Image (cartoon, grey):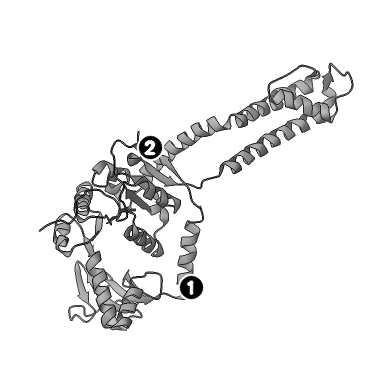
Amino acid sequence: MRIIGRSARGGSEDDDVPDDPRDERSHGVLLPRTSVGPLVQVMRRIALATAVMVAAVIIVYLDREGYKDNVGGGPVGFLDSLYYVTVSLSTTGYGDIVPVSDKARLLTTFFITPLRVLFLIILVGTTLEVLTERTRDQWRLAHWRNTLRDHTVIVGFGTKGRSAAETLMSAGLTQDRIVVVDPNPAVVELAGADGYAGVVGDATRSSVLMRARADRAKSVVISTQRDDTAVLVALTVRQLSKSVRIVVSVREQENVPLLRQSGADSVITSSSAAGRLLGLSMISPSSGAVMEDLIQHSKGLSLRERPVTKAEAGRTPRECDDLVVTVIRGHQLLPFDDPEVGRLQLTDRLVVIHRVSDEERAAMERAVSERRERGPGSWRIPRR
């Protein structure tokens, strides 16, 4: 038995970028976040600074009788209040306009001084924002790692990985329950732009899979470029967790037994499956169209696995509203016409062909759209 492939990297089938372990980008975690353009950030700071100045001017002007103009000698007006606030907030303080009454000095102490500090914070906001963002990143990463469990890890986010993620989302899995692992930082950044959390690194290393918390995952989808990589990843995942469900995509049929020995629960041969679909479409174009419709979860006819309802218990598979294909009883897969099936039991599960209604399809599309409304952009949390 041979394994097809030359490289043992946990990347996608579209990945041709080498994974350098010395590169800091290969050991990071990316969590999705909405990015804000620099112009928007500058405008926000200008607006905050202006709001602080306006508040200070109003405070000073309302108590203008408590201030004295040492130069002009006249009453303090609006322009004098604006001038005083400007030199005060900028910590220039020429001393030509000063508070003389107790009330004015109290206002300066408890209102103007905090506003001055706030104004300075806005001025040096770039540095503080970097420090705050790093603190927030560290807290968010720690919280993410501590709470992440029963999720799905997708190793390799190429065409197959993206399609698997979209199918999972159409089946109701939320986007925050999917973690992408890929050695190519650009691929993980694109996944972050779509709203997925991502880990940059080689999935054949247990340390990389631990960052994705594969040890606490519910399932792992392996869609790497090469079959030898898939074997190594499957072995590593099974070493981390004995209960996680592993689904693997391979190119060559002869490598399927090796993947099963490596701990994979399901192995999909991509080249053979595509070839069979091509052959079926040549023999019967209508049958090929039906099969293609079945594997698209949120359109037309859809294959689903669901439990037996109380109303269906005690009936035969033919008496169910949905078209039953297979009955899952224990660890056995029984065809719907198998004599062993008999009457359905509440502990059974059914694989049925279900027609997706317009309302269901619209709800799925709306849910996917809402998950992606956060827009492009991601931020990186490097490894310590």
Residue beneath the point at 81% across and 30% down:
61
Residue beneath the point at 36% across and 75% down:
293
Residue sitting nearer the eye, 348 or 135:
135
Q: Left or right: 65 with respect to 214?
A: right
Dot 2 or dot 1: first in sequence order is: 1
Quadrant in the picture for residue 76: top right
Could you tell me which quadrant the N terminus lies in?
bottom left
Residue 262, numbered circle? none
Could you tell me which quadrant the C terminus lies in?
top left
Residue beneath the point at 78% across and 23% down:
104
Residue sitting nearer the eye, 304 or 36:
36
Q: Is residue 190 above or below residue 311?
A: above
Residue 359, numbered circle? 1
Residue 382, numbered circle? 2
Which class describes the residues within 10 Å of circle 1: few (<14), some (14-19), or many (20+)?
Answer: few
Q: Left or right: 177 with respect to 208?
A: right
Q: Is residue 310 visible?
A: no
Between the residue at mark 2 and the residue at mark 1, the CA separation in whole angstroms equals 43 Å
